[in-house]
Image (cartoon, rainbow, N blue to C red):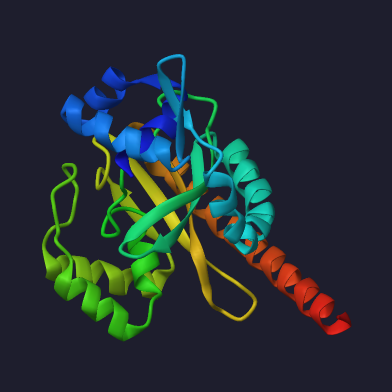
Amino acid sequence: MKILRIVARRGPSSLTKISVEAGLPLPTTSRILNSLAENGVVRRVEGKYELGARLLPITAGLESLKKSLASVHPVVEELSRRSGEDCGFAVLQGNEAVVVDWCYGPCDPRVIEPYSREIPLYCAFGQVLIAFQPAAWRERFLNSAKLKKMAAGTVVDREALAAEIENIRRTGLHVSFAENVEGAGSLSVPVFDGLSRLQGALFITGPLERLSGERLSKHKELLREAAGRLRSELAIQREDIRRGLGRT
């Protein structure tokens, strides 16, 4: 998965560059890439590796997610325009938060790195995804998660993490400071569908110096407004699907 993320982010890349960025020995990287190439997941063109056609039928099973994202992206794009920061939408996959839609703001540096590495669920907007799972799921995760320091603000104390999860459930908002990336923070809120089921976490992220004071308050307002709009969009989409099924 690390190798696939690198190839997806970098585009056509040499064996040596992939090996270095993945932190894997050259023979190991070569063996994995050859196996992926034999199965059509990557292809080798003029000595460089890129994503292969075999991924297309695999992603065909994600049609329902793609339909939901059709509603998500305009909201994320508008949120980024109004906040001036990187914004995105993340969903829960196993014990990982996966950024499935994003839009970069006009200012450097770019904080979102959707392809580059795993995003621990106990960091930043991942905590929102934990907070609105069933109680038994939350308890199981909090008891079993291996909490590793990712940046200066990462919460690695289980009791402190549990307390923050409860605070998110009360307020519907999480503000993080250097939990996942040094020098960067984020604000995140849950997004529900028309049946109050959690769909994902909507977030704004940027350098810490741009996430304070009046600007922070404005971001909170923008996030909650965007989450409400997205909930309405998803409810309409669900109703359209229900009516379509009724007609068939």
The residue depicted at 30 percent of the width and 74 percent of the height is: 166
Measured as percent of width and height from the top left, residue 133 is found at 38, 76
Observer able to see residue 67: yes
As drawn, the residue found furthest toward the top would be 46
Position of residue 84 measured from the top left corner of the image (x, y, whole percent): 54, 34
Name the residue rendered at 26%, 29% in the picture: 30
Q: Nearer the viewer, residue 35 or 130?
A: 35
Which quarter of the image is occupied by the N terminus?
A: top left
The percent coordinates of residue 104 (x first, y second) are 52, 33
Q: Extreme left residue here?
A: 157
Q: Which residue appears at 31% of the width and 47% of the height?
A: 118
Q: Nearer the viewer, residue 238 or 168?
A: 238
| Viewer-side residue, 69 vs 109 | 69
The residue located at (28%, 37%) in the rendering is 32
Q: Is residue 115 visible?
A: no
Q: Up-down: is 22 above or below 57? A: above
Work out whether 102 lies above or below 139.
above
Name of the residue lying farthest toward the right: 247
Task: From the viewer's perspective, tell me whether residue 128 is left or right of residue 224.
Answer: left
Report the quarter where the C terminus lies. bottom right
Q: Is residue 216 left or right of residue 116?
A: right
Image mark count: 0
Q: Looking at the rendering, which quadrant does residue 18 occupy?
A: top left
Residue 120 location in percent, x, y? Answer: 27, 54
The image quadrant of residue 206 is top left
